[in-house]
Structures are given as structure tokens and as C-alpha cells.
Amino acid sequence: MFSFVPAFQSRRERTLSCTASKMKRLLPLLIVCFLVHGVEVKSGRFWHITDQHWDPDYNESATPDHVCPSSSIPVPSAGFWGDYLCDSPWVLINSSLQAMKNILPDPDFIIWTGDDTPHISDDDTTEDTVLMIIQNITELISSTFPGVQVYPALGNHDYYPSNQLPPKNGHIYNVVAKMWSEWLQNSSQQTFQKGGYYTEIIKGQSGHRIVSLNTNLYYNNNNQTGDLEDPAKQFEWLEKVLKDASAASEKVYIIGHIPPGFFEKLRNQYWFRSHFNKHYIDVIHKHHKVISGQFFGHHHSDSFRIFFNSDTAISTMFIAPAITPWKNTLPGVNNGSNNPGIRIFEYNITTLELQDMVTYYFNLSAANLYSPKWAEEYRFTTSYGVPDITLSSITSAVKSFRTNQSLFQTYYNYNSVSYDLETCNEMCQMDHYCAITQLSHEGYAVCVNGATRPYHYPIILTLMLLCVHYIVP
């Protein structure tokens, strides 16, 4: 239908009609501006901790060959608070929980993404020892944060034999489900016993959901699942959970231990078997609109990932640093240790949108020489010069890595929790950049061979720029 201005209207009437027509066209834009600038954001905060790796046999007073079974080489100068060649002594793990209590004693909830036991041979441990370690750390978290909701996930070391988490009910699943019963509802315990995964509405937040995955089922070192298409039917379950969440207008956080994609510290190193990696990415592509964040561990390093659909960024994933300082023993990894780290996320409690991230660290060398101190390492928005940690802001920061060497080096320093402060050379930069931006095997191969994807600004950024054009005088 065409619209027109009758000839008998006065100039003033025609002006008002034109103005009304313009305002009608701009109304959606004004609504966006109001949502972005005019609504008071209600913020919440939660902790993310991962990879404690308690070594009960750590002994700084022992001879170098017997300081810790988690190191395969002599430890010449071990300290009271730990050593970069070893997994965590209990005093370090306890210190991290006390620091969390001092910094933020009343979080909305805690995400705990697994790996509690030390890096030792299965010949040197037992199932009872694995369960004892999980039990002790569970009790420490519970007693430090009584009444606080915790959403845990199993790591690949939280089983015996290590890495071999089964795609069906198992004894450890049953025991741990009971161990975590103060945090998990009955329905969550049932799916956890079936395959180590569960979902719950975030406590006290209607319309916000946590999905805890057992991604150890997809691990390339798991001999129980390699020939399966959908171990424990977790993908089928996940798709239904996300589909139902979308129908109910919910928003979702996904948590797990082992992330998809590639390890930024070693070229071509990945964890998921290729068909599982593709399946996970396909799920994110299909359901990304309902997912507000993904949170993983396993790397021991501090990094993040951007999922793309063609050239459009659709989702982000955050990989939290470990509490253990243990040196990575994968051949080819340089300076594989890290300082212990813990992390707070700030988020919009109305939309579940992530707003900022603050990482705290424990300078292990300084603690052993002088005194222990957990200090703020960095706030994401300040260090990367972005307004928040939404998808568009993370994408903007990563885009700057390609031209801003200083900013990339800042990221690299944080990657090891301020342990490895050497300059990241061109090949090193490529490995990190490609791991961050390419989670598929095909895209990663193209990237490390010299090609990169162009970036496109998301529509919300375009609308915000239009807001400035039309509204700011």
C-alpha cells in the first residue's frame, strides 16, 4: 500500500505528518538505543575455578627426586606453597578457596570444572584415592561457601583409570552424584549417574539454565567411546535441552572440562575426536541464540574462543586458568607452567549476558620467597579496551590482535597467568590466533597455513552507531 500526503494539507500538517512517518521508521532503532543505554543493568557475579590437581604426596622437604610424584623430573628448589614442576599441595588449594572467600564471599553461584587428582600414572593410584581427593575438595568448597550453589563438572582425571570415563552408568558416577547431592537436584543426579552430565535452572533465577557436560566422553584419550557416534546419548540430550530452553525463552550457560577446538600452546593439538568436535560445533551453530556463555578448563592456561558460522561470530567460550602450577609435559610445549589463577564473571542477571571478567592470581615464586598473596591480575574490559565481554566486544579485541602487537602480548602474558613473559614470535602468534578463531579442523588447517577469516561487525554494533548518528546532536 502506498502512502501519500493529501494536497489540501497545510505546510505545518505536512511537516508533522513527515515527522511522524520518520519517527515510525526510527521506532525500532530508538527501542534498541533505550535497551542499550536507558535500562539500569542489574549485575550479578559468580566464580569459575578449575584444575586443582591436588597432589597429597607433595613434600618440599624431600630430596629433589621425591618432592612430588606428579613431576617426572627432579624438583631442585621446591617451596612451601608449591613448585612449577608439581601439582598443587593442599595449602595452595586451601589458600585459593580462602582468597575467594575474602574477595567475593557471597557469589550467586560457583562453576567448578573438574580435574582434582594429580598427574600421575594409574599404577600409582587407585579408585579409592581418586574418590578421596574429590571428596576432600568437595568438602572444602562446601565448608568455605556454605549455602552457595555450586555447579560442578567432572574432569578427565576424576576417574579411574584416568581418561576412561564410560558412556554408561559407572561406580564413580554413582558415588560422586551422591557426594554432590547438596548441590544437585534429584533429576540432575539421575542423568549424572547415567553419563556424568546434567542441567538445572540456576538457583534463584527463573529462565536461566546451567548445562554441565561430560566432554571427557569426546576425549581422544578415552578408549571407551572412540567408535561411538553419541556416547551416553549426551548430544541427543543436549539438543533437546537447548531446544526446550529456546521454546521456554530461557538463556543457557554451558560448562564442562575439556573444550572443543585446538590447544593454543601447541600447533595441531586437539582434544575431541574429530567427529565429536564437528558434532559439538554443529550444536552451537544450531542453538547459539539461546547460549549466553561457555566455560571450560583443562588447558591450565587463560584463553577464549570465538565460534563462527561462515564469517559471522555467533558464540564465545572462556577457558579458565588452573589452580595447579604443574608444567605441561606435552612434547613441543615451551614454558608450560602457569601461576595459579581464579576468576570472577560479572553478568546481567536479567539477560544472563556477560559483562566483565576479573582474574586473580598467585605469584608462586614470590609466595615461596616472601609471602603468599592473591592479587588481581587483570580486568578484561580495562586490559583489552572494550566496554564489556559480549560477543561483539570479544570479536573486536581479537580483531585488534592482528595489528596491535602490544595488545596481543598482553593477552600472551595473561595466557600463562603472568608466568611466561617472553615475546610471542610470529609462529606463536599464529598458533594462538588460529586456536581462538578456528575451532573446526578444516578452518584451523587453513588458518595455520596463512589464511585468516575477515570480520564483520554484528548488527547490534551497526544499530548503536546509527543511534549516535540520529540522536547525538
Image (tube, helix red, strand yellow):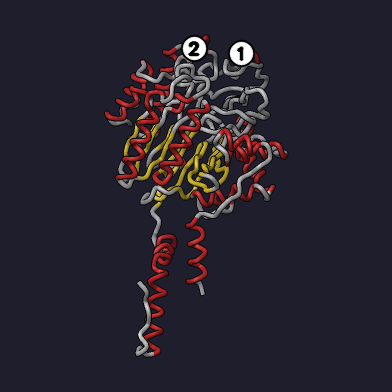
* Disc 1, SS: helix
Looking at numbered disc 1 in the image, what kind of residue is underneath it? Answer: His
| Residue found 44% across the figure and 60% down from its top | 36
Q: Position of residue 266 (x, y in %)?
A: 64, 30
To which residue does mark 1 refer?
A: 66
Disc 1 to disc 2, C-alpha distance: 16 Å
* Quadrant assignment, res 88: top right
The residue positioned farthest toward the left in the image shown: 186
- Kindly identify which numbered label has been placed on residue 125: 2
Left or right: residue 130 versus residue 367 is left
Q: Residues within 10 Å of mark 2 (few under 14, many from 20)?
A: some
| Residue found 47% across the figure and 50% down from its top | 355
Residue 31 sits above or below residue 280 on the image: below
* Quadrant assignment, res 241: top left
Q: Earlier in the sequence, mark 1 or mark 2?
A: 1
* Quadrant assignment, res 416: top right
Name the residue nearer the viewer: 120 or 8.
8
Q: Residues within 10 Å of mark 1 (few under 14, many from 20)?
A: some
Residue 214 in sight from this viewpoint: yes
The residue positioned farthest toward the front in the image shown: 1
Residue 396 sits above or below residue 82 on the image: below
Looking at numbered disc 2 in the image, what kind of residue is underneath it? Answer: Thr
Mark 1 or mark 2: which is in front?
A: 2
Q: Position of residue 449 (x, y in %)?
A: 68, 37
- Kindly identify which numbered label has been placed on residue 328: none
Name the residue nearer the viewer: 442 or 381.
442
| Residue found 55% across the figure and 36% down from its top | 439
| Residue found 43% across the figure and 24% down from its top | 229
